[in-house]
Amino acid sequence: MKVVASAPGKVTLFGEHAVVYGQPAIVTSISRRVYVYAELRSDGVIKIEARDLRVPGVIVTYREGEVTVETEYGLVLPAISYLNKAIELTSSYLGSRHGVNLVVRSEMPVGAGLGTSAAVAVATVAAYAYSGGYELSKEEIARLGWEVEKAVQGVASPMDTSIATFGGFMRIRYSGGSIEREFLKVGVDLPIVIAYVEREARTRDMVLAVRDRVTKYPEIYGRIIEVIGEVTSRAEVALRRGDLYEVGHLMNVNHGLLDALGVSTRRLNEVVYAARSSGALGAKLTGAGGGGCAIALTKPESADSVETVVRFLSDFTMRTTLGVEGVRVEVVEKS
Ligand code: MEV
């Protein structure tokens, strides 16, 4: 069986970090996807090729317990850990391991804070299962994808893997092991500019740094987390109503609180302030912080000028449609 599975990246509109502490977050899929092509092999060998991942090309071959890694500059791509773990956990869930040729292609840079690792995990789980003739429900794909993220990163909420699987606009809350997902009908188009600045820290380190602060000063950081939850709940109402001004205002408040948590950087703040002063209705960092992406909500007519200004301060910018379809599997050839 030959299949192609794809999953979208994401931006968190409200509630990153606070979601780790049981507060709600609002997240949406973006129109950039990760594609995983999978072809069943009869010799049991698993071969992975990573393309367009903004690192030198990598080819990893597994043969009878032996792993061969070929790269242009000797750099082993972290994304390979997600692929490897996805195969391991999916085959143990299915109770059967089959050989496969996997080719991974990404329309977004890896590690920018756009949920690429979750998209890689989710698309690989789906591609691996379907190439072996197995079908999985979205619930199963989301759960396995989350297991992959947790295994590779050590800490992860189910937010990124949920949105990569289900797509759309989602309010998510995770507490005491249970996941509440609610799909939101947003009453308006959200013109968003995404700006990326170089990442200075990994998601895992940012999450652990916040955990340290919350543990040390619960009456300060714990309260900031609670206020972020309150901002998110109000934003949900504003999004359903299609009130762009209120959404923008709440994005600004959310960014201030993330800065107080210590996850923003000078460059992210510069992008956020420049976006606001060039006409954005609101702007905030999105994702784990420590560099990575900021998002600006604009009026439709000011998106171009906001993008032009923030482009000067960031490594790249992009515009995207929000709320796209989640994981998708297409069968290319039946065996
Ligand atoms: C990372 O995209 C979002 C965080 O809230 C971590 C997580 O939810 O796993 C910072």
Image (tube, helix red, strand yellow):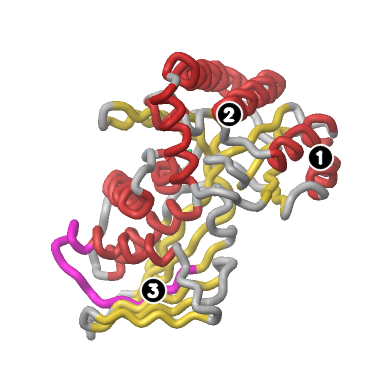
The kind of residue on which mark 3 rests is Leu
In this rendering, the answer to whether 293 lies above or below 80 is: above
Which image quadrant for residue 189?
Answer: top right
Quarter of the figure that contains the N terminus: bottom left
How many other residues sit within 10 Å of disc 3, few (<14), some (14-19) or many (≥20)?
Answer: many
Q: Position of residue 183 (x, y in %)?
A: 44, 31
The answer for how far apart the CA atoms under marks 3 and 1 are is 39 Å
Mark 3 secondary-structure assignment: strand
Please provide percent x and percent y for residue 332: 40, 72
Q: Which residues are magenta?
A: 91-104
Q: Do the residues under discs 2 and 3 have CB atoms within 8 angstroms? A: no
At mark 2, the secondary structure is helix
Inspect the magenta stretch and tell me whether residue 90 lies in it. Answer: no
Front residue of this view, candidates 275 and 264:
264
Identify the residue under disc 2. Answer: 258
- Seen as rendered, the residue at the extreme bottom is 43
Q: Which residue is mark 3?
A: 102
Q: How many marks?
A: 3
The label nearer to you, 2 versus 1, is 2
Q: Label 1: how many residues lie within 10 Å, few (<14), some (14-19) or many (20+)?
A: many
Q: Is residue 99 magenta?
A: yes
Question: Is the residue 335 above or below the residue 141 in the image?
Answer: below
Residue that carries the numbered disc 1 in the rendered image: 306
The amino acid pointed to by label 2 is Leu
